Amino acid sequence: MSAGTQAAVQIVIGGLLQGSLFALVALGFALVFRMTGVINLSQGAFCVLGALVCYSLEETLHLPVPLAILGSVLAALLLGLALGAAVFVPALSRLPNSSMLMLTAGLLTFIQGLMLVFWGGDPYALRPLWGEAPVQVLGVRVPSQGFWIAGTAALVIAGFWYLFARTTLGKALQASAENPTAARLMGIDVERMAAMSFGLAATIGALGGIMVAPILAVQFDTSQFFTISGFISVAIGGMGSFVGAVVGGLVLGVAEQLAAGYISGLFSGALALGLLLVTLLWRPTGLFAIGAARRSDVREELHVHPAIVRLRGRGAAALGVAALAVILVLPLLVRDPGLMGSLVITGILFIGVLGLDVLMGFAGQVSLGQGGFMAIGGYVAAILATTYGWPPLAGIAIGCAASLVCALLLSLATMRLRGHYLALATLAFGLVVDSLDVGMMQTTGGPSGLVGIPSLEIAGVSFATDRSMYYLVVGIIVVLVLALIGGTRSAFGRAMMAIRADRLAAGALGINVARIKLAAFAISAVLASLAGSLYAFYFHYLSPEMVGTQRSFEMITMLVIGGEGTLVGPLLGVALLTLLPTLVQSLALYKILAEGLLLVLAFSFLPEGMFGGLARLVARLRERRAPALASGLEAPS
Amino acid sequence: MSTPALELKGLTKTFGGLRAVDGVSFEVPAGGLSALIGPNGSGKTTLFNLITNLYRADAGEVRLFGAAIADAGDWRIAASGVVRTFQTARVFPGMTAIENVLAGAHRHVRAGAWQQMLWLSRARQEEHALALQAEALLELVGLAQFRDTAATDLPMGAQKLLEVVRALMAKPRLLLLDEPAAGLNDGETAELALLLRAVRDSGVTLLVVEHNMSLVMGVADEVIVLDAGAIVARGSPSEIQRNPRVIEAYIGQAEGAR
């Protein structure tokens, strides 16, 4: 074998090993999707959790390796079953698909937060089961752990086949997936089957994580990488197809390693996104389509819909003016500079969350890449200002334009597809932007960030102080909120709500669903971009994690706990999550955990958010005092 | 003769081995009110889905006001003035009754979103005028007092009427109603009959799928009977009532069941 061929074989083998892990994660995805029609974003977290628990059992408790592996797999199974039965399955009958997706994002954040609290932010690697020395096979060096990875993958796949082909449990699972109603009539506990699939998927993920951890160090937020890789694998292979999941995983693994080996490691993320988009355009159903995903169709027919509580009329206007007065006076009362800074950040993030509210609260589309658009806005404006000396306003405009172009491309590529491909494309997009921020050292400053960004200056007026920045941001917010109130109390707003509620019926009334979705996505991207630019100018510094995927998830939490579809409601969520860590410094470590937990709790107990809860309370008080006055408030169901 | 509002030529659709619609041809003259009846599973709703392009026909073609619809998206069909309702009332959850009706006006709104964002007075005035129209329509079907009620909180009969009114707000040229009387009580059904006649008299062409025979016989100009995906009879309501094949396929069966 020539050296070139040998290197190629070496790379392909590495790819197949990585692909085996992707295949395992993808199998978990396929299982849960087939059973419930939901894309479970928390899948990747169980991989990391399995590896970390195993590490602690081995290194801290000094358990023998087989026992440590068994213990960590059991831990993942138990956590999976518990979360599945207590959170995931009960939500299935109450939440629409878009909210289910966000709920699983909440679970992902929650598990990541748990891991951050217990294991910190450091990467961990397990000891290889057969020692460090690679094995020579026909002149190619294979890490000994590779045999374990491949063996585990093969074993799990065989187990899957046996479960579904030979056991009663497998038949019951399959029946629940194919036709839940009929399965229920046959005495199958469909809910239990769904919870079980969730637990099983968690177990498979953990097993994959444990096997791969000796050659790939993992830390709490590697979860996102596993989740998106698993998802891309399953989308390439065909949503819900087990064979497709395995093939998709291997294809993605090899393609990523080839790209890393021959082009640059930097672009393997972009390659994965590209591969996903190309597959979806060329063959939307993936390589191994299993026909229509029936459960997902059924769920769309359900029209489960969270209550949206909005305030209207004079009362709402008066409340708005009062709230604005408080906001304007606030800086005069706040003495603590740290708190003042947090108020500015609250305002800046709220601009991005406003965009998210239009997209998710009104049009019912999920974006998991809001941080990516913030990054584009932030880096473009900052780089133009520092390196090229452009005026800030021009940089902001270019940033918005760049975000708009990205949003249009993503949206056009996923437009023909049903389900939540846009949401997952945004997640992949966000992760690509993350990796570019880190990787393009020369332009972005890499992981240590971009320094020396000037203060915002518009027409000779400098906004260098916290207070001036605060009033500028408040001014922008007032203009945006007024514009969006006007824009949503119109044909456009109704069309978005109609699409969220019932896409088919909306189309039958002449609403151009694709165009409205595109417009909503464009608005959300531009507002995120604007927020990102302001963020950079305010901090005079920008680093990848300030506008990363964690930020995207955080913004979703802010939106949901504040109150979707209410425009002003999310401000409560943004303020809570931004001000609380400032007021109670010791909470900083628990921030991610709290964000995940709050999102999950909000979906379970307060789906209308804090704003909705407050509005409902006001309505009840008013009714008690004067029933006639309550007409300014509408509270569906 | 003027162009028919709706023209079907040899329309066929199969699901697996089942020929749900099997070579159906008929036309609805402009300004007419035709009723489509037939037992459950005879292909009526499938026909609606073919006309509005939710399904793609395996063979045959649909012409709306003389134009072929092949490849037109659902919103384009509606934009050409062909509006439908659904068998199960599909009001928009999370929206009030009046918002639901206003959503029907979508294709007639002139002011763009940006004009609304700037609160231009022309845009607000248009919005106000639309709201008045919507209120008048709600009044017409006796739903005015539910103006600000969440649509999904209304009783089923009211939801069906709301859906019809929402379709009317779109000012269709051809209105396709899928079992509008299902879930309505006798009083509401009588009101619906009046409404349908009034709509027809205002120049809108109607095609109604309906099980309620007294409604069909009372309002339709022509009745088309479908069984197992094919037309078994066509004619005026009184002809259909006397047709032995129809009695066998549909009416006889229904009466026998009672």
Image (cartoon, coloured by chain):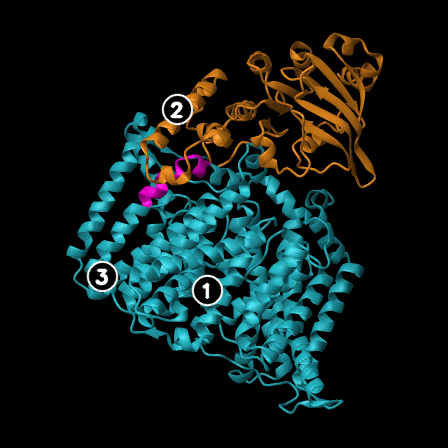
Q: Does A609 sit left or right of B91 as displayed?
A: left
Q: What range is drawn magenta here?
A: A481-494
Res A525 → quadrant: bottom left
* Letter of the orange chain: B
- Kind of residue at badge 2: Ala
**Can you give x and y, in whole percent of width and height, for residue A379 in the image?**
38, 67
The quadrant in which the N terminus of chain A is found is bottom right
Disc 2 from disc 1: Cα separation: 45 Å
Tell me the element at label 3: helix
Q: Does B143 sit left or right of A580 as displayed?
A: right
Disc 2 from disc 3: Cα separation: 46 Å
- State which mark lies toward you, 2 or 1: 2
**Can you give x and y, in whole percent of width and height, for residue B64 in the image?**
66, 27
Q: Chain of mark 3?
A: A
- Kind of residue at badge 1: Thr
Q: Colour of chain A?
A: cyan
Res A401 → quadrant: bottom left
Tell me the element at label 1: helix
Q: In the rendered structure, does residue A534 fall within the stretch colored magenta?
A: no
Mark number displayed over residue B170: none
Mark 1 vs mark 3: tell me if same chain.
Answer: yes
Residue A87 seen anywhere in this rendered image of the structure: no
- Kind of residue at badge 3: Met
Q: Nearer the viewer, residue A565 or B158?
A: A565
Mark number displayed over residue A549: 1
Disc 1 from disc 3: Cα separation: 26 Å
Q: Nearer the viewer, residue A72 or A36?
A: A36
Q: Chain of mark 2?
A: B
Going from N to C along the chain, the mark reached first, 1 or 3, is 3
